[in-house]
Image (spheres, rainbow, N blue to C red):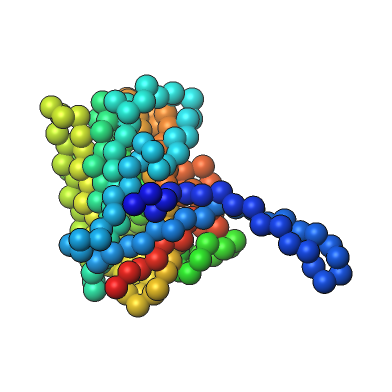
Amino acid sequence: MQGLWRATPYTVGFTLSDGESKTISGTTAFAPVYPDGSPGMLTVDLANQAQYVDLGGGTSGGDDLSGTMTLTYDATYLKVRATIHDDVHSPAADALNLWSADSIQFAFASGLPAPGGAYSEFGAALLGSGPALYQFSPVGGSVAGGQVSVVRDEARRTTVYSVQIPWAAAGLSPGDPYFSYSFLVNDSDGSGRKGFIQWGAGIGASKESAKYLPVQRMP
């Protein structure tokens, strides 16, 4: 539906009781998250609903980097799925450095985005050794109970990611009515990370959960 899962800048002006005028600005979204398998599940078109951040390598457009992302849940897991069109698959050497080449990263924080908030950040990639899932924050390492599948189709030039993160590992509870989320796709054509496409922010250029976007858990 139009307007859903779309980052939207806002500016709000108001006047205090003493007559002083204030302005608050930022970015928000209405992003409902439905149970896995629900007919209401929504897919984000990254080419139209996300932002490309150029780190000096440039991009040739949709054939270079594009795709879709879906976030759903069940009683046990938060589920991130992404189908990414990428003309050249170039992975990192290991899970710790997966961010430096073709991969996805995503993060969760409890409640609405706020400065200084705790967050849990993850990454997934198809390395030379196979699919990898890594937790970057709050501590680095493997994800207890996490599941990952990453499949590359060279003929179609697509990489399909399917990641399941336990609620507790994300720092969240299945009963949370809303939480904060950010997602990105890193791109490398063989000479290091040249850029990334992001929904939300606060992962790729800086570590700031205040730049995540709010999502709403639907029953």
| Quadrant housing residue 73 | bottom left
Image coordinates of residue 29 in percent, x first then y, are 47, 55
The foreground one among 60 and 14 is 14
Q: Is residue 209 left or right of residue 183?
A: right
Residue shown at 20%/61% (left/top)? Answer: 39
Looking at the rendering, in which quadrant would you find the C terminus?
Answer: bottom left
Residue shown at 36%/25% (left/top)? Answer: 61
Q: Which residue of the protein is positioned furthest toward the bottom in this rendering?
A: 175
Image coordinates of residue 13 in percent, x first then y, are 71, 57
Residue shown at 44%/58% (left/top)? Answer: 30
**Above-or-below relation of 157 to 36:** above
| Quadrant housing residue 102 | top left
**Number of marks in the rendered image:** 0
**Above-or-below relation of 133 to 194:** below
Q: Is residue 93 left or right of residue 149?
A: right
Q: Is residue 26 left or right of residue 219?
A: right
The foreground one among 77 and 29 is 29
Image coordinates of residue 144 in percent, x first then y, are 26, 65
Q: Which residue of the protein is positioned furthest toward the right in this rendering?
A: 18
| Quadrant housing residue 156 | top left
Residue shown at 36%/36% (left/top)? Answer: 47
**Above-or-below relation of 174 to 137:** below
State whether residue 126 appears in this view.
Answer: no
State whether residue 35 appears in this view.
Answer: yes
Q: Is residue 47 left or right of residue 18?
A: left
Image coordinates of residue 98 in percent, x first then y, are 33, 42
**Above-or-below relation of 95 to 136:** above
